[in-house]
């Protein structure tokens, strides 16, 4: 196992993530089976790569001291499948918007897995890696490969990149760069992937393909993770969501980071999504639509 490079927020203990289902519609997968599959994913796929153990527990509410992964009906951000947040006491809180996901014929399990990955690697959503050409890449472990899926006990999980993806000294094909082995070099994006980057004094995004950039352009990016980073860069205080201690989760005034939208998914029995060969392609720089005064991430 790789030594721990990135540690959970409470680095002296394995974090407990309370999984709370407040959706009023079926998830498309049994909730307890989903949590069990996520735990198996964490234990056998993610933690061996990143050194970030976690304990997932189904719960009616988030107990004090626990992180949260909450399933809600709809996103308060148009087009978002889910995003993660930090409560004012600094504990990671991921949200999965079930109706939004199902309406787009996507899988709740993949979004939940995506949020879990990124919460574990960068719980404060503030880590970056220096990449080529003076560009800083956010430590987003699922974004570069977010449209690739695979099954754990019959339930679709998200592909994710390995630590080597962020290491510029790695030569092509010299290491494992993502779980499914679809990428061959550091900082490479799948056609359906993207990455928040900091360059020329501001946050923007790189996309694996023009179609991916267009899909993102249709989303309301306000309030996403890059907004938090941008606020920091500008010396402004970052907003936080309300503390959630009961049965209601405030839906506004939230700092985020998210999982985006994907096109037509498939059964996910094997690495599917981007079926095109994994030839190196030049990332597409996000356009001004999303990167103006309104922040996105
Ligand atoms: Zn993400």
Image (spheres, rainbow, N blue to C red):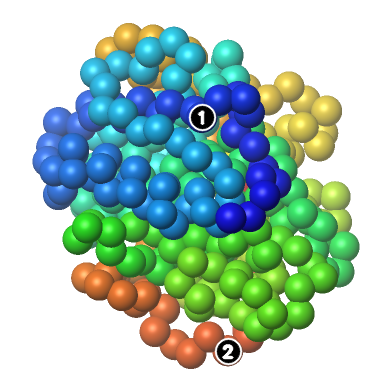
Instruction: Write down the quadrant of residue 167 in the picture.
Output: bottom right
What residue does disc 1 label?
Answer: 14
Q: In this view, does 208 lie above or below 99?
A: below
- Visible residue check, residue 112: yes
Q: Which residue is drawn at 14% across and 43% down?
A: 30
Q: Which residue is drawn at 20% across and 32% down?
A: 23
Of marks 2 and 1, which one's residue comes earlier in the chain? 1
- Visible residue check, residue 104: no
Left or right, 270 with respect to 296, comes to left
Q: Residue at x 59, y 72 (%)?
A: 176
User: Local crowd at mark 2 within 10 Å, few (<14), some, or many (≥20)?
Assistant: few
Q: Is residue 89 above or below residue 223?
A: above
Q: Secondary structure beneath disc 2?
A: loop
Q: Which mark is residue 279?
A: 2
Q: In this view, does 78 lie above or below 273?
A: above
Residue 275's spot in the image, x, y percent? 39, 84
The one nearer the camera, 209 or 269, is 269
Q: Secondary structure beneath disc 1?
A: loop
Residue 249's spot in the image, x, y percent? 36, 19
The one nearer the camera, 255 or 165, is 165
Number of numbered tags placed on the structure image: 2
Task: Give how far apart the Cα atoms at labels 2 and 1 are.
Answer: 38 Å
Q: Residue at x 50, y 78 (%)?
A: 182
């Amino acid at each position: 196992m790789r030594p721990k490079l990135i540690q959970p927020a409470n680095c002296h203990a394995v974090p407990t993530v309370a999984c709370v289902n407040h959706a009023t519609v079926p998830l498309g997968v049994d909730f307890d089976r989903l949590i069990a599959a996520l735990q198996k994913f964490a234990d056998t796929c993610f933690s061996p790569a990143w050194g970030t153990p976690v304990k997932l527990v189904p719960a009616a509410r988030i107990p004090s001291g626990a992180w949260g992964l909450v399933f809600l009906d709809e996103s308060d951000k148009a087009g978002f499948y889910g995003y993660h947040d930090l409560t004012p006491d600094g504990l990671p809180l991921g949200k999965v918007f079930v109706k939004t996901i199902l309406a787009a014929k996507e899988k709740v399990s993949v979004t939940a897995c995506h949020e879990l990955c990124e919460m574990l690697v960068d719980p404060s959503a503030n880590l970056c890696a220096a990449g080529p050409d003076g560009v800083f890449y956010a430590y987003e472990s699922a974004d570069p490969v977010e449209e690739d899926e695979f099954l754990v006990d019959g339930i679709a999980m998200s592909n994710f990149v390995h630590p080597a993806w962020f290491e510029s000294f790695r030569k092509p094909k010299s290491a494992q760069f993502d779980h499914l082995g679809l990428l061959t070099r550091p900082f490479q994006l799948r056609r359906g992937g993207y990455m928040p980057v900091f360059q020329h004094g501001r946050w923007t995004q790189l996309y694996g393909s023009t179609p991916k950039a267009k899909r993102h352009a249709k989303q309301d990016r306000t309030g996403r993770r890059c907004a938090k980073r941008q606020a920091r860069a500008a010396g402004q205080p970052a907003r936080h969501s309300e503390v959630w201690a009961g049965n209601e989760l405030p839906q506004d005034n939230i700092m985020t980071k998210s999982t985006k939208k994907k096109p037509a998914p498939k059964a996910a029995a094997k690495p599917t999504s981007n079926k095109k060969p994994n030839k190196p392609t030049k990332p597409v720089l996000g356009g001004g639509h999303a990167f103006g005064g309104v922040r996105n991430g």
